[in-house]
Each structure stands twice: as C-alpha cells, then as structure tokens.
Image (cartoon, helix red, strand yellow):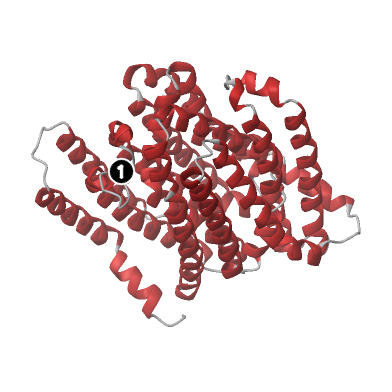
Amino acid sequence: MLDKIKSLSKQTLIYGTSTIVGRFLNFLLVPIYTNIFPPSEYGVVTLVFAYIALLNIFYSIGFESGYFKFASTLEVGDEKQNFTHPYVTIFLNAVVLSTLLLILSDPIAGIIALNAKYTSFVRYSALILFFDAIVLVPFAYLRLKNKAKIFAAIKIINIVVNVILNILLVVVFRMGLIAIFISNLAASFITFLLLLPIVFKNLSFTYNSKLLDELWRFSLPYIPSGLASNMIIVVSRPIMQFLTDEATIGIFQANLRMAIIMSLIVQMFEYAWRPFFLNNANEPNAKQIFSKVMTVFVGFASLLLIVLTFFIEDIIKIPLPYRGHLIGVKYWGGVYIVPIILLAYLFNGIYINLMAGIYIEKKTKYLPLITGLGAIITIAFNFILIPIWGLTGAALATFFSYFSMAVYIYYVSQKFYPIKYELNKIFLICLINTAALGLYYAMFYHLIPSNWIIKILFSIVLMAGIAMVSGLSKARRLIFNSKPA
C-alpha cells in the first residue's frame, strides 16, 4: 500500500508544483485588476468568464471523462481509436458552437444583459472556448500516460503567456478590459500549437462504431452533471447581477480568489487522483489505500484552512512595491467570506475523493443527480440568502452545495463500492475546522481580542489537534521515508 500512496504523492507533487507556479503567476493578475479596474468593470469580466465556464461543458460534452475511462482499459478499440473518436467529436462540436456564438454575438450580449460596448467579449469568448475544448483530450492523454512533467510545462507556458500579455496590454498599453480577452485567446492558441504533435501522433483514420456508442453512453451524463458542477462555481455571478450589480460581483470574485491555496490543493489532487485510482482499482488493497488517502487529504487541507482563516485579513493588505495592495482597497469589504469559501473547497475535495467508486463501477448515471442537487441548492440559497446577507449569503450557498454533494456521493459510492473510511477522524477534523471559523468570526466582530499573538496561538493549538487526529506526521514518514511494501 505504501508504494502506491508514495506514487500518488509524487504525481500530486509534480502536478501540484506546476499548478502552484501557474496559479501564482495567474494570481498576479488579481492585484493588477483590482488596483486598476473598479469593482463594476472587474464584475463585467467576471460575469463573462462565468458564462464561459458554463459553456465549456457543452463544448466538451463529457468526452474527456469518456476518454479517461476507455483509454485506460482499452476494453473497446485500440489506443489510437480511443484517442481519435473523442478528439474528433469534441473538435466538430466546438466548430459548430463557436460558429453560432460568432454569428449571434449581438443578441447573446443582449440576453446576458451585457452593455453594447462589450459585445466583442462574446466573440473573443467563442474563440477561447474553441481552443480550450480541442486541447482537452491531448491533456487527458498526458495525464493518463503519467506525463506529468510535460503536462505541467505546457500548463505553465499557457499561464506565463497570459500573464505577460495582460501586464503588457493592461498595465503598459492601457487597452482596458478587452486586453484580458486578447491575452486569454493568445494563451489558448499557443497551448493548442504545443499539443499538436500529440494529436498527430495519436490520430487514426479507422472508425469503431461500438467505441463511439460506448463513449456517448458513458459521457452523456457528464453534460448535465458537468453543467451542474460549473453552475455551483459560477451561477452566483449572474444571480448577483440580477439581485445587486456588477460591483458586488467584482468584490465577491476578488475575495473568492483569496481562497486560491485551497483551490490549488483540490485541483492538484484531482489531476493525480483520477488516473491513480483507475490504474490501481484492481489492486487487492485498493480500498484500504483509498481510505487512507481520504484521511491524509482532509487533514492536510485543514491545516491550510486554519492558517488562511486566521491571517487572511493581514494577507490582503500586503502592500505592493509599485502601488496598491495585494487586492485593491475597494475590494477589502468582502474579506469575511474567505473562511466559508475555504471550507466549501475542502468539501469539494472530499467529493472528488469519493468519485473513485462511481468511476470504477461505471455508475456515472448518478452524477447528474448528485451535481444536480448541488446546483439546485446553490441557486435556491443564492436567491434566498443574497438579499438577506449579501456576499455572505453567496458564500454560504457555495458551502451548502459542496457539503450536500459530498454527503450524497458518499451514500451512492458506499452502495456500489463500499470503503471503510476513517469517519471518526474526519468528523473530529471537521469539528476543529468549525471551531477555527467560529474563533475567526468572534475576532472579526470584536467579541474576543484579535492580534498576532492570539492568532498564532489559536493556529498552533488547532493545527496540533488536526495533526494528532489525522496522523499526518506518521503518514508523512510512511510516504516519504518508507521503502515500498
């Protein structure tokens, strides 16, 4: 078991290093945007990219997940057919959808209540969506083949190009909001060029009707489930536009980005986790491995949650060398939502961990139900809570949706692929996290004193409790110091 967990740790480290570097570079844009653009303009960009995130699902049509499933087993067709069929399907679908967006850009801008001067954003979005879609399968190929270093390098190049162009076009040439879309499009196009050799290497001109039928059958549930998943992430923005204004969207988005480290942990884990559990599903002790991975993940993510919860207000006020702060002063009013978002992301990580059984047992038909529940809860609570609590309501809606999804997928996965998770430990860790949030809000509302010494003491005590409960120190020694069993 130890050699398997060690392998997952190394893959996660490689993906994580690239993700951290990439996200850090991308995070440099937040100070730029929030110190240059007012919340109302940043809110417009946030709104458009929220719609891009939703449309991504219709571009991929779930075939990235279908590729993972059938290319990992080759139960139908050969290796090149398993690459070609999902790739060509996504490519043709992307051509049709982007053409429609380009032709109908004006009416679409009106439908989403976008000011007429921003109609060009829709056209740029059509091209960004196209190039982002046609690299999905090549990226999945790299992950499945454990080509983590190549995957990481291309991802970093994408972000470096995007950041450099943003700095040049936004800061130097002062091109305004349009520069953000030009930079993203250029980065997506360069990424496509870098992945072209993989496409040419794996294309096949043979047709396998059975494989295509299996891909559609397996992948179609990912359209509603993927749409629901993305709605959980971005639907609060259109609802905020309806209930409030673009400035509120901008403040929410800027502070949402402050939870970037927890988002990073979840994303880097997900990159390594899916190919790991698919490749190790037939191991005799697979369930024992998956159980231990869950505990280690929750424990480690909770350590980050505690540190960020107590020190987030100090972090956002870090002065920048040229001017301004880590995020602009006009955005500071929403910092109190960050701890709630951190906890929400942690439960998203638990949800991702629990997906193993659904994939292994081919029970993807349940994913639309699970993510659909999350989407319904998100939409309902956004409409109910935003008018009452504003930004806090939107943050709580995000938490409730991820929490409900984690509970529901646990029930389903245990039904078809039962695993003895260390529930007592996980429950105690969640109690400690709840205590951390309670102490933070007590300090925020001046119910108890707040200074660096108190924050450090609270952090040390709570983190020690998590380390003892989860056995993180023991897990670290086993993973990094033990020889394979």
Choose top left, top right, bottom left or bottom right for residue 198: bottom right
Choose top left, top right, bottom left or bottom right for residue 97: top right
When the figure is inspected, residue 181 is found, relative to residue 7, above or below; the finding is above
Query: Front-most of 30 and 347?
Result: 30
In screen coordinates, is 156 left or right of 108?
left
Residue at the spot 48% in from the left edge and 21% down from the top edge? 241
- Residue that lies at the very extreme toward the right in this rendered image: 206
Residue at the spot 28% in from the left edge and 35% down from the top edge? 336
In screen coordinates, is 88 left or right of 316?
right
Q: Residue 206: x and y, percent?
A: 91, 59
Q: Residue 250: x and y, percent?
A: 42, 31
Residue 61 visible in the shown view: no
When the figure is inspected, residue 386 is found, relative to residue 403, above or below; the finding is above
Circle 1 sits on which residue? 324
Query: Front-most of 434 and 412?
Result: 434
| Three-letter code, disc 1 | Gly
Q: How many numbered marks are there?
A: 1
In screen coordinates, is 208 left or right of 436?
right
Q: Residue 249: x and y, percent?
A: 43, 28
- Residue that lies at the very extreme toward the front in this rendered image: 173
Residue 239 visible in the shown view: yes
In screen coordinates, is 218 left or right of 306?
right
Residue at the spot 73% in from the left edge and 31% down from the top edge? 101
When the figure is inspected, residue 14 is found, relative to residue 55, above or below; the finding is below
Tag 1's secondary structure? loop
Q: Residue 118: x and y, percent?
A: 59, 27
Query: Front-most of 82 and 350?
Result: 82
User: Mark 1, residues whose alpha carbon is within 10 Å: few (<14), some, or many (≥20)?
Assistant: some
Residue at the spot 49% in from the left edge and 57% down from the top edge? 22
